[in-house]
Amino acid sequence: MNITNFFDIDKSLLEFDKKALDAAESRFKKIDDVTEYCQLKVLSAFIENNVSEAAMSGSTGYGYDDRGRDTLDKVMAKCMGAEDALVRHSFASGTHTLSVALFGVLRPNDKVICLTGRPYDTITGVFGIDSKTDGSLADFGVEYSQVELLNDGTPNIEGIKSALSGNRYKMAYIQRSRGYSLRPSLTVDMIEKIIKAVREVSPDVIVMVDNCYGEFVEKKEPCDVGADLVAGSLIKNPGGGIAPTGGYIAGRHDLIEKCAARMTCAGVGREIGATLGHSRELYLGLFSAPHVVGEALKTAVYAAALFEMLGFEVTPASDENRGDIIQCVTLKTAEGLIAFCQGMQSGAPVDSFVVPEPWDMPGYTDPVIMAAGAFTLGASIELSADGPLREPYAAWMQGGLNFHSARAGVLLAANQMMKNGAIKF
Ligand SMILES: *Cc1c(COP(=O)(O)O)cnc(C)c1O
């Protein structure tokens, strides 16, 4: 490997690196197959919608008649297997995007049920699960409940059926990614199974999927298997590492219109919204996304293989099917977790000289450490890792704009652990 020309990596670690690559090879082939499929899907969506150079030019003020914006919506709809979509740089985060979709569709006294246990942390505030947070759905009279996952972290299909029978719910909500939990992510096959179960007992319920971290990981997307609405963040998979901010919602046309009314205001909806100078980045990012997601997946598989060989527990395992780009590596000790993050940071293209330290992040009970040296603040499609300083000292890592550099980042993380005595032979 060429890495020793540029970085000082322990020789014994390089042997593990080679073995990890060998072990990952057959997975890499499968990833390439999906990447190619998704890349051609995106390319044909661009061609079908006659994307032109003029589409990139952008608008100011109200943004009336911004053809580039409207065309990007159509391209994204096609990529997500949906009738319609909204793609906007003005969505401030994934949570904001999901929130617009939820408020767009739900009305006071509606009931929403989450089918995949407790949702991602920031969404709990949107639903108002723990308290009627100001401006939450609960604050507006939308009632929340959830079906717990089974002990192995998989969806409880029978439990979902019995909870939904009788058509009491307006919306059933599914989270595709594991987020920062230890449960497995959902494959699209599993999402299809859940939706089939839902439709058996409650044909009219709106099925919404939090698609964060899942886009382009598989050939199919949730709307291809019957989801009514999906949403996600552009500083994750579908922004391809190029979109500087933003989010998207895709799904049934009637529901997208409702979301548009919430996104700006009733009566105007999607007709306004200046794209400023951002259209080109959103187009280019979406076009690059399948490839970048493939690189992130290779990074995750490689890291899993390497740390398995080094004697650590990882989830998912290197040879397991994946529904998202997240990799969890259990590092056993606080020193190990800190060294892992510091080593990974030292291999980042931006802020490599920063030495991350654990800190008391608002809203968390234990100190958290993070490695993030990214071009876009908080972009988790770029190589990054974080974890709370508590048992089992797990790092959740994700991203990698290209495998060659991300592999170095992962090796530097392991190397720093060796230096600190957190890996011994
Ligand atoms: C990232 C993520 C979100 C949205 O998070 P933001 O930080 O607001 O972009 C929502 N759900 C899941 C599962 C996520 O991974």
Image: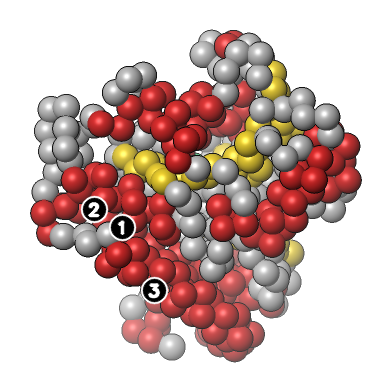
Q: Is residue 399 left or right of residue 189?
A: left
Q: Secondary structure at mark 2?
A: helix
Q: Residues within 10 Å of mark 3 (few under 14, many from 20)?
A: some
Spatial distance from mark 1 to mark 2, Cα to Cα?
Answer: 6 Å
- Residue assigned mark 1: 285
Tell me where residue 218 appears, x and y as whole percent: 56, 66
Residue at x-position 57% and y-position 23%: 106
- Residue assigned mark 2: 281
Which residue type does callout 1 highlight?
Answer: Gly
Q: Is residue 240 left or right of residue 322?
A: left
Instruction: Identify whether 157 is placed above or below 298.
Output: above
Q: Which mark's residue is nearer the viewer, 3 or 2?
A: 3
In the image, 7 versus 233, the foreground residue is 233
Badge 3 or badge 1: first in the primary sequence: 3
Instruction: Identify whether 153 is placed above or below 346.
Output: above
- Residue assigned mark 3: 40
Q: Secondary structure at mark 3?
A: helix
